[in-house]
Image (cartoon, rainbow, N blue to C red):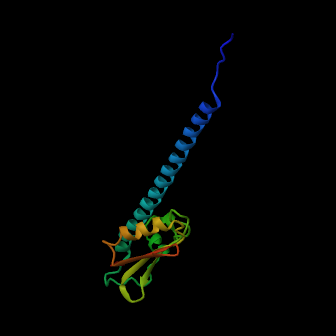
Amino acid sequence: MRKQRGFTFIEVLTVLSIIAIATIGSLAVRDWAVGNSRVSEAKSQIITIQSGTQLWRPKNGNFTGISMASMSGIAAVPESWGSGTELNPWGGNITVTVDSADATRYLVTLTGIDQAGEGARLARDFNEYAVDTSFSNGTLVVRFQG
């Protein structure tokens, strides 16, 4: 009598199940890592803008007329950033404007943040350093004192 060789159907299913679970787990970790990367890049961009505003700011401390284009024009931020269109890690825009209530403050706005958790985390991360932050409907607004 010949002995049969090979795997049983149950053994094959078990191996395929283990591979499927490992793949799903690695996809979840990848999504988490990509989210962390986007938040880190956005934080770096905001900090660069914050530094650039100090170079752009006139002696009187008034931010009237500030914009991404005006800061790019004097290399206060990378010139390649231009007007801030489609610049942030989610593909949205970044704008810098004077605070209409106080010309010695400015607003950094990121639009198009399609991951609410990442936007909320970014807002929370700047709570200690900014006058205030808000995130809603895919838009982050950070208000800084000049």
| Residue 52 in view, yes or no | yes
- Residue toward you, 65 or 93: 93
Expressed as whole percent of the image width and height from the top left, the position of residue 108 reads: 43, 75
Residue 36, compared with residue 47, is above or below; it is above
Q: Quadrant of residue 50?
A: bottom left
Residue drawn 44% across and 60% down? 41
The spot of residue 118 in percent (x, y) is: 46, 64
User: Along the horizontal axis of the image, is 1 left or right of 69?
Assistant: right
Q: On screen, 2 above or below 96? A: above
Q: How many marks?
A: 0
Query: Looking at the picture, how far across and down is residue 104, in whole percent?
Result: 34, 84
Image quarter (top left, top right, bottom left or bottom right) of the N terminus: top right
Q: Quadrant of the C terminus?
A: bottom left
Name the residue nearer the viewer: 82 or 129: 129
Residue at the image position 59 percent from the left and 31 percent from the top: 11
Which residue shows up at 51% across the image and 47% down it? Answer: 25
> Which quadrant would residue 64 be assigned to in this image?
bottom left
Residue 143 in view, yes or no: no
**In which image quadrant can residue 7 be found?**
top right
Residue at 53 percent across and 71 percent down: it is: 93
For the residue pair 119 and 103, the one nearer the viewer reads as 119
Q: Is residue 12 left or right of residue 127?
A: right
Q: Extreme right residue here?
A: 1
Q: Residue 38's x, y, as percent?
A: 47, 59
Point out the residue furthest to the front here. Answer: 1
Seen from this angle, which residue lies furthest bottom?
Answer: 101
Q: Please state if 130 lies on the left or on the right of 26 as rendered.
A: left
